C-alpha cells in the first residue's frame, strides 16, 4: 500500500486502541500535532481530564483495538548489501552446498550476463562441511563475476573472473580456490560492488527502507566504511533519507575522519559517527575474532587484531575534538581488551565524565568477562548487540561451542550482565548477516541459550526501541510514548490472548506474551516517524 503522508502541521487523533505509555498505563487514545505527541488519554468524553487539548482535529485514526507502541530501531546494518540480498542470492536458508549452487544457477538464468552478489552461506550448517570452490561457482553461474559472502561477512568465495579483476589472489588473506578474507576479501568486495550502477544502489536502499517500515522499524543505523561499502554509498543513502520518506538513517563511517566531518556539514545529511564498524577484530565463524585463549577447533590460533590500543585512543581523541561519536567492531575478549585499554587511555586525557558523555559504542561485544562489563559501564559505552547471533550460533551443538568449547560459548552475549551493570543495550540485526526482524531479536534476547544471560521481554523491547535512539545520541524522548516526545510509533494488530497466558494490564504484555508462547511477530498495521506515516495497511 502506498503510505499516507499527512502534512507536518496536522493534528491526528488515534483512538479506540491500546497505548503502551510508561506515563499513562490505561491509555486508549493519543493526539499528535505534526511531529510531536501532545496528548495521551482515554476514550471517555464525559470526563474533562480525558479530553484532548482544544482545537480542530484534522484526521482521526480508529485503532479498532490495535496496540500502539514505540517504533523499533535497528542499530547496526549494511543497507546496500541488505537490499541486494532481498533481491539477490540469499543463501541463509540453504540446507546444503548443492542447494546453494542450484540457487546460484537459477539466479544466473534469471539475470543472464549480470554479476551475481550473494550472502549468507555457512559451511558449518552444511553436510558437505565446506564452502563452494571458485570452479563450482564458474560451473554454476558461467563466466560472470560472482561474490558470495559468508554469513558473518568476514569471508567470501569469488569466481575466477572476479579474482583476476580484483587482484585478490595477490593480497593477504587469499586462502586459495576462490576463498578469501582480510585484504583479499576487501579487494574482492570493492571490485564486486564498485561497478554497481547508482540506480542499483538506490533501489537497494529503497527496498530496505520500505521493508523496514513494514516491520515497525522507524530508524536504521548504517555501518559504512571503505572495507564494507564506500563514502559515495553512504552519502547517497543519507541523501535518499533526506529527500524521500522512510525510516531515519544514522550513518557511521569507519574510514577517514574528514569524510564523517564533511557529511555532518552537508545540509540535511547526518548525523554521522566516526567509526561504527571500525574493525578491531573479525568474526568467530571465520576464526578471525581476537581471543585471549586459542580457538578450541584451532588450538594454535587466537584470531586477528587489526588495531592496537594506541589506535583506539587516538580515534576517540580525534572524534572528541570534532564532537563525534565513535564505534568499534569487537567480538572476541582480546579485541574488547584492546578497545577498553584505548578508551581508558583517552579518558586519562579527557576525563571519564567526558568520555561517558560521548556515548561511544562497541559493536557486537560478544565474548565478555565481568571486569570488562564493569569497565564498559564506567566509561558509559553503548553495546550494540545482535540477539539473533545466539539464536543461530548458540547452544551445545552450535558454532560458538565448536569454536570456543562449552564454557566460553556459555559466556557469549551476556545481555543480562550488561543490563544489570548499567550498560545501555541497543538491539540490531547486522543485516544481511541476520535478517531485519526486531520482534525476533526481542524473542531471542529473552530466550537466550544460556538462562543467566536472558533479559526480560520488556527490557529487550526497550533495548530494541529506546536503546537504539540512545545509541544514536538522540535525547529528545524518542523511543517512548510520552507527551512531548516525537510522534514515532508503530501500531500492531492485537492478538487474541494466549491460552493460559497472563498478559497483565500493559497492552505491550499482550504482544510479548503472544511472542513468547508462539514465536510469531504481530502484524504491523502502521509505522509513523515524527508524525509522518511510512507504512500503512488498508
Image (cartoon, rainbow, N blue to C red):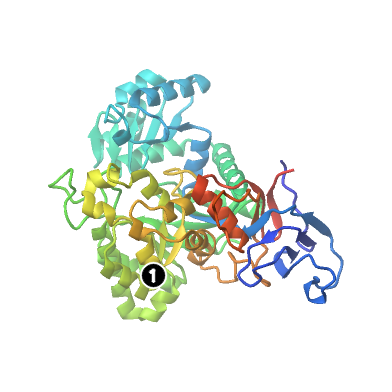
Tell me which residue sits at (68%, 59%) in the image. 18
Q: Position of residue 52 (x, y in %)?
A: 80, 70
Foreground of the two, 341 or 171: 341
Compared with residue 457, is residue 135 higher up or lower down, i.e. above or below? above
Compared with residue 25, is residue 448 higher up or lower down, i.e. above or below? above
Side of 208 where 118 appears, left or right:
left
Q: Position of residue 381 (x, y in %)?
A: 39, 69
Compared with residue 456, is residue 304 higher up or lower down, i.e. above or below? above
Taking the view exactly as shown, the residue that stands out farthest to the left is 300
Tell me which residue sits at (78%, 76%) in the image. 49
Foreground of the two, 411 or 254: 411
Count residues near mark 1 (Cα–Cα under 10 Å), then give few for <14, some for 14-19, many for 20+.
few
Q: Position of residue 294 (x, y in %)?
A: 16, 51
Image quadrant in which the C terminus is located: top right
Tell me which residue sits at (49%, 19%) in the image. 109
Taking the view exactly as shown, the residue that stands out farthest to the front is 500
Q: Position of residue 246 (x, y in %)?
A: 63, 51
Side of 355 where 206 appears, left or right:
right
Tell me which residue sits at (32%, 68%) in the image. 373
Image quadrant in which the N terminus is located: top right
SS type, badge 1: helix
Give the residue at mark 1: 420
Foreground of the two, 249 or 66: 66
Q: Is there any visible trace of residue 433 in the rendered image?
A: yes
Compared with residue 106, is residue 408 higher up or lower down, i.e. above or below? below
Foreground of the two, 247 or 465: 465
Q: Is there any visible trace of residue 329 in the rendered image?
A: no
Quarter of the rendering containing residue 370? bottom left
Amino acid at each position: 500500500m502506498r503510505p499516507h503522508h499527512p502534512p507536518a502541521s496536522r493534528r491526528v487523533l488515534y483512538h479506540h486502541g491500546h497505548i503502551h505509555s510508561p506515563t499513562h498505563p490505561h491509555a486508549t487514545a493519543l493526539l499528535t500535532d505534526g511531529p510531536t505527541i501532545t496528548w495521551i488519554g482515554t476514550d471517555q468524553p464525559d470526563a474533562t481530564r480525558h479530553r484532548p487539548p482544544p482545537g480542530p482535529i484534522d484526521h482521526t485514526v480508529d485503532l479498532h483495538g490495535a496496540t500502539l507502541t514505540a517504533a523499533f530501531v535497528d542499530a547496526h546494518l549494511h543497507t546496500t548489501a541488505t537490499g541486494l540480498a532481498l533481491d539477490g542470492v540469499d543463501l541463509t536458508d540453504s540446507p546444503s552446498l548443492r542447494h546453494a549452487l542450484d540457487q546460484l544457477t537459477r539466479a544466473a538464468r534469471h539475470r543472464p550476463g549480470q554479476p551475481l552478489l550473494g550472502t549468507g552461506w555457512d559451511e558449518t550448517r552444511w553436510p558437505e562441511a565446506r564452502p563452494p570452490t571458485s570452479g563450482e561457482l564458474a560451473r554454476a553461474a558461467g563466466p560472470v563475476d560472482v561474490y558470495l559472502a559468508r554469513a558473518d561477512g568476514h569471508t567470501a568465495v569469488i569466481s575466477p573472473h572476479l579474482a583476476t579483476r580484483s587482484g585478490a589472489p595477490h593480497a593477504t588473506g587469499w586462502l586459495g580456490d576462490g576463498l578469501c578474507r582480510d585484504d583479499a576479501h576487501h579487494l574482492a568486495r570493492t571490485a564486486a560492488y564498485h561497478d554497481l550502477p547508482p540506480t542499483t544502489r538506490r533501489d537497494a536502499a529503497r527496498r530496505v527502507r520500505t521493508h523496514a517500515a513494514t516491520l515497525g522499524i522507524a530508524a536504521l543505523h548504517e555501518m559504512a566504511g571503505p572495507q564494507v561499502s564506500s563514502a559515495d554509498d553512504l552519502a547517497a543513502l543519507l541523501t535518499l533519507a533526506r529527500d524521500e520518506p522512510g525510516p531515519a538513517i544514522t550513518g557511521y563511517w569507519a574510514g577517514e575522519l574528514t569524510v564523517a566531518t564533511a557529511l555532518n556539514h552537508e545540509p540535511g545529511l547526518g548525523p554521522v559517527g566516526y567509526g561504527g564498524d571500525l574493525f578491531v577484530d573479525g568474526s568467530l565463524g571465520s576464526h578471525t575474532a581476537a581471543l585471549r585463549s586459542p580457538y578450541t577447533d584451532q588450538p594454535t590460533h587466537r584470531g586477528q587484531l587489526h588495531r592496537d590500543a594506541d589506535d583506539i585512543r587516538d580515534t576517540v581523541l580525534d572524534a572528541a575534538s570534532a564532537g563525534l561519536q565513535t564505534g568499534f567492531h569487537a567480538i572476541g575478549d582480546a579485541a574488547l581488551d584492546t578497545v577498553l585499554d584505548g578508551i581508558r587511555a583517552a579518558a586519562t586525557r579527557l576525563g571519564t565524565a567526558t568520555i561517558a558523555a560521548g556515548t561511544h559504542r562497541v559493536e557486537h561485544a560478544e565474548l565478555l568477562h565481568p571486569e570488562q562489563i564493569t569497565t564498559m559501564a564506567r566509561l558509559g559505552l553503548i553495546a550494540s548487540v545482535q540477539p539473533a547471533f545466539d539464536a543461530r550460533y548458540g547452544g551445545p551443538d552450535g558454532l560458538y561451542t565448536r569454536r570456543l568449547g562449552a564454557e566460553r560459548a556459555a559466556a557469549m552475549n551476556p545481555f543480562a550482565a550488561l543490563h544489570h551493570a548499567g550498560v545501555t543495550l541497543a538491539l540490531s540485526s547486522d543485516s544481511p548477516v541476520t535478517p531485519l526482524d526486531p520482534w525476533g531479536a526481542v524473542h531471542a534476547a529473552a530466550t537466550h541459550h544460556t538462562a543467566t544471560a536472558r533479559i526480560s521481554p520488556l527490557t529487550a523491547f526497550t533495548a530494541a526501541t529506546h536503546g537504539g535512539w540512545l545509541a544514536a545520541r538522540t535525547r529528545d524522548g524518542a523511543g517512548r510514548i510520552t507527551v512531548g516526545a516525537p510522534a514515532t510509533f508503530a501500531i500492531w494488530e492485537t492478538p487474541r490472548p494466549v491460552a493460559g497466558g497472563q498478559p497483565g494490564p500493559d497492552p505491550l504484555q499482550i504482544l510479548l506474551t503472544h511472542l513468547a508462547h508462539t514465536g510469531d511477530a504481530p502484524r504491523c498495521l502502521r509505522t509513523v516517524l515524527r508524525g509522518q506515516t511510512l507504512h500503512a495497511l488498508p
